[in-house]
Amino acid sequence: MSLGLLRALLITDPLVILSTIFFGTINLIVSLFDQSGNTQVAIARVWSKSLLLLAGVKMDVDGVENISSNGSYLIASNHLSYMDTPVVLAHIPVQFRFLAKKGLFSIPFLGYHLKRAGHIPVPRDDPRGAVRTMQKAAEVIRARGISILVFPEGGRTRDGVLQPFKEGAAHIAIQAGVPIVPVALVGTREVLPMGSLNIRPGRVTLRIGKPIETKNLTARDRKQLTEEVREQIAGLLEGHK
């Protein structure tokens, strides 16, 4: 959960607040006994579904058949809103962690949850730290057989237009030797616009593309792979239109 989404939840429907407190408390207790973080992610998935339901978000999901629930992937998605992560978490049935701003790990309760669940902090304005983070993400994928969620644009788009991709996602996938799953989100920007703290009812579409293999690729292929992933996501967005 991002800080912006947390703030939005604090001023929205009381049922959403109660749901967040309820599942957050359970998650905290479970984290004391489950070192893997898998149960925490499962609980967070239920919370995400309850959040979307209570917020009045209607979902259209396409392409789930393209992935295996037991698979290990680098999930690459466009980024429109703080609601993107709950939407992906609720509807992509794989065990995954995500990269989060390092500052979020310092927030009481939220930071503890992120750390215990195994999410990975990303330092800002620290190129060397960013490289170490990518290496750690690849190691987590290889060692634990789970997936990582990355937003290759590097941040939310202000106008809803797909932005150029950074090469970090391709780097992680190549190092880990796992396929990249392109994901396209439509509608989350209307549900929770940038700069707004009001979650609105609406319809959101999540489209999952076919995995892009990275076997036999090297670091020199990062740029080409990054362009291919962006083209695939752009195609999924265009297909929705």
Image: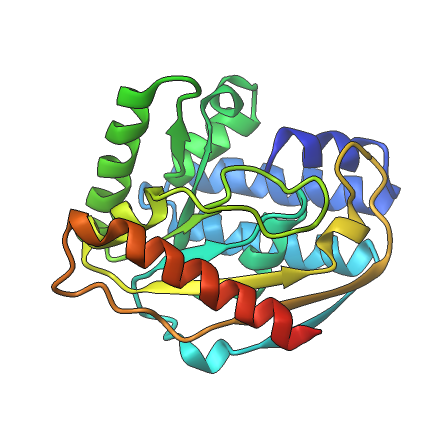
Along the line of sight, the residue nearer the viewer: 46 or 81: 81
Q: How is the image coloured?
A: rainbow
Asked if residue 147 shows in the view, the reply is: no
What residue is rendered at 85% in x and 32% in y? 11
Question: Looking at the image, is 130 positioned above or below residue 61?
Answer: above
Q: Residue 33: name its quadrant.
A: top left
What residue is rendered at 70% in x and 50% in y? 160
Q: Residue 155: name its quadrant.
A: top right
User: Is residue 219 left or right of 179 when viewed as pictured?
Assistant: left
Image coords of residue 239 (percent x, y): 62, 76
User: Is residue 201 left or right of 142 when viewed as pictured?
Assistant: right
What residue is rendered at 32% in x and 27% in y? 130
Question: Looking at the image, is 144 positioned above or below residue 238?
Answer: above
Asked if residue 121 shows in the view, the reply is: yes
Count of numbered labels shown in the rendering: 0
User: Is residue 175 left or right of 226 when viewed as pictured?
Assistant: left
What residue is rendered at 82% in x and 34% in y? 197
Image coords of residue 97 (percent x, y): 41, 47
Question: Looking at the image, is 158 positioned above or below residue 186?
Answer: above
Q: Residue 20: name its quadrant.
A: top right
Image coords of residue 231 (percent x, y): 46, 64
Image coords of residue 127 (percent x, y): 32, 22
Rendered-image quadrant of the N terminus: top right
Q: Residue furthest bottom?
A: 65
Rendered-image quadrant of the C terminus: bottom right
Question: Looking at the image, is 128 positioned above or below residue 95?
Answer: above
User: Is residue 147 left or right of 215 when viewed as pictured?
Assistant: right
